Image (tube, grey):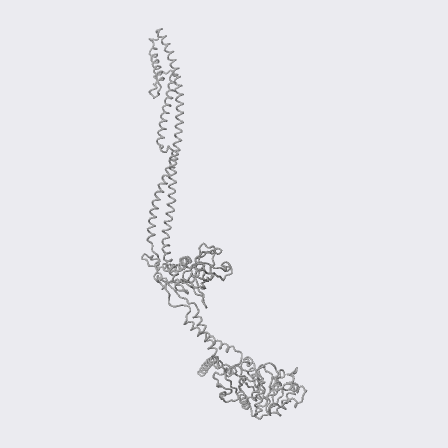
Amino acid sequence: MGELEGNKGKSEIDDFKKIVLIILGKWYWVVASLVIALIVAYLINRYTTPIYNVATTILSKKYERQSSRNAIDVIQGGEYFSTIKDINREITVLRSYSIVSEAIRRLPWDVFYYKEGNVKTSELYRSSPIEVVVDTSSAMAPHGLNIRCVIRNSREYELEAEDEDWKRRLGNRKYQFANSYDIEGFKFVINNKSNVREEQMIIFKVNNMSSLVSQYRGKLNVGWVAKGSAVLRLSVTGEYPEKEKDFLSSISQVIVEKSVIDKNGMAVKTIAFIDEQLDHISDSMQVLGNTMQALKLENRNLTLGSQQLFAKINELEEKKYQLVLTNQYLDYLDSYIKSKGEGEVIAPNTIGVESGLLDNLVTEYVKLRMEYKVESNDLVRKSPLFNLEQQGKVELIREMEESILESLENIRATNNLSIREINDKINMLVGSIQNLLKEEREFVDYRRIYSLNEEFYNILLQKKAEAAIAQAGQESDYEILDTPRRMGGAIVPKTNRNYTMAIVIGLGVPIAIIYLINFFNPYINTKEDLEKHISLPLLGMVGHSKEPYPLIVKNRPKSSLAESFRNIRANLQYFHMEDGDREAQNILITSSISGEGKTFCSINLAYVFALSGKKTLILGADMRKPTLNKFFKIKANEGLSNYLAGMCKYEEVVHQKVIDNLFIMHSGSVPPNPSELLMGKEMEQLMGRLREDFDIIIVDSPPIGLVSDSLELVKMVDVSLVIVRQGKTQKVALDNLDRMHKEGKLPHPAVVFNDIDFKRLNYGYGYGNGYGYGYGYGYGYFKDDPFEKKPLWKRIFNRE
């Protein structure tokens, strides 16, 4: 168990070392990336406009603890949650559109000014040499557009706009400083504030206040300095600290004043309400006074009053009563006279009948009746003279009765007429009294309402005075603690952080790319890749050749490449001796796909065998894509396919070429059925004869991963050499070859690692900087290796 853990730990260390060495192999990538990242960081720090944080603090007095606190709210937490809600609401209110808008409205921010530099444009806050005054009555203005003011001299300037519409409106003309202009509704004046240089260009922008308010609402941060404190911090970020200080000063003042206005809101509304009510009451009292005066003028009886009218009615009633009483007496008297009453008659004056004639007649009549009554006794009646006198009296009484009755009728008629007149007057007075009572009641109501209004008017005057006193004594809920100030240095760009990020990115990105390229690379690049994907023994490694000719061993016999083929030759002898005493004679050279260097390895390996005194034949068995005839310039119709087809003799297809002991049998013409030719008895017979005639037979076969031709040939050879080309052979192809080996389809196989860039292979596998198995090749031992003095940049980056 301990051994397994130790092997695992060693494997992890080896993996880490491998990754490090791979990265070091691409050190120039890392250095270049780091330099570029640092340059980018420098440019960012150099040309990024600095952003500063400006803040101020104000004290909120809204949440000071009160001694008269509701105990139930404290116990149940109601006060706490209410306070939290109020705090959150307060922060929202302080960032409201109305407050920010009022703060900006108080600032001279209708127009911003800029100066255009070589790289960036900077704002001229409080330092612009010109002043643009936009008339508020302008029907339209170029809000948000950059207008260039090109100063021609101290008196004239020109205006340019990027917008085509405004460019047309402004026109190509000169304007005068301090003169007013109206450009299609855009009214403005530009003043020369200080000495300006000729041809100086100032950019100005007429601000859209709504957009500016929205911008600063987004920039404004409001929060508590500490949890549970009553101090609020207001902060904004911007390029120009003085500009942000002005904004914070303005909004702080607005907040303080708004608090007083809000607290005075009730008093102001109360006073306004009272003033409104006083106006209404004053108008009502004036209307009531005018109405009462009009009633007095229209009804003069109102000045007398209903009591005097009642007295007049009573007086008339008394007169009427007297007349009625007189009529009753007249009726009595009439009845008395007509009934010849014996009793005493009532005198008219006793009941208030004022009539001298009637009174005399009645008195005389009563006297005659009394005399007649006295003289009519028995003694007197007996005298004839008396009888005559009595008859005279009777006649006189009768005449007097007629006179009285006539007088009664006259008096009765006069009385009735007087009664009717009195009744008319009484009725008239009664009607007057009824109208008078209604109007008098209305007048009394008006006077009562007038008195109530007068009383209410006085009360409102008192309340208005109290509200004014309360308004004068209000204090703000906020107090400015600190004036706005810049909080440290620039928050953007963060110089140190940018350089740190540049280093991290400059190192991390290339390292990650190198790692990912290596991780996802589908090709065989290292010996470790080779060992991981195929279980065949590694017979040798051949370096990369820059030479234009393929026969390296002949042209540069002392080169490292030539020595690598000699190593393969030696290893082949020891490789086959492990299986038996007989040395390998038939050697098949194949690959997974075309282009991996099997023909190159075939001719050079055959050449070193021939140099060692072995009679060697190169057999071109790749009849689908023949190449040997091109290398050695042999006729294409004199080769293996022609011989197997019976078109040539054995002696005609075996060619001696280049040096002694090296013979060539190329593939010949391209046949339609190469697999059938290789499967025939002629091929077996040919291989048997070649064994007898040659010491070494190098079979240049087709790619075993593409066609089945090589599977027919491996049955006839002693060793199968699989050529694996660095950066060309895919890992999946080696997996397939390894599977074929395990299935017994590749007898006695081995691998030759070809076209190696040893700088890509140099991370600790014992091969040093040479080629082969640790002999130290490449340090001046091989005199035929070309030496080229590289340019400085190639020597720095170790590039080919």
Q: Is residue 585 left or right of residue 798?
A: right
For the point 37% across and 65% down, which residue is it? 486
Q: Residue furthest right?
A: 647
Task: Examine the rendering and report whether any part of residue 575 can be seen.
Answer: no
Q: Residue furthest top?
A: 384
Q: Is residue 56 above or below residue 21?
A: above
Q: Is residue 399 above or below residue 277?
A: above
Q: Residue furthest bottom?
A: 613
Residue 728 placed where, x, y %?
A: 55, 80
Residue 747 placed where, x, y %?
A: 57, 86
**Quarter of the figure with residue 1:** bottom left
Q: Nearer the viewer, residue 506 or 683?
A: 506
For the point 44% across and 68% down, which residue is it? 48
Q: Is residue 56 above or below residue 742?
A: above
Q: Is residue 357 left or right of residue 668?
A: left
So how many labels did they put on this image?
0
**Quarter of the figure with residue 556:** bottom right
Q: Nearer the viewer, residue 645 or 175?
A: 175
**Quarter of the figure with residue 412:** top left
Q: Nearer the viewer, residue 149 or 747?
A: 149
Residue 593 placed where, x, y %?
A: 58, 81
Task: Examine the rendering and report whether any part of residue 364 can be seen.
Answer: yes
Residue 380 placed where, x, y %?
A: 33, 8
Q: Residue furthest left?
A: 67
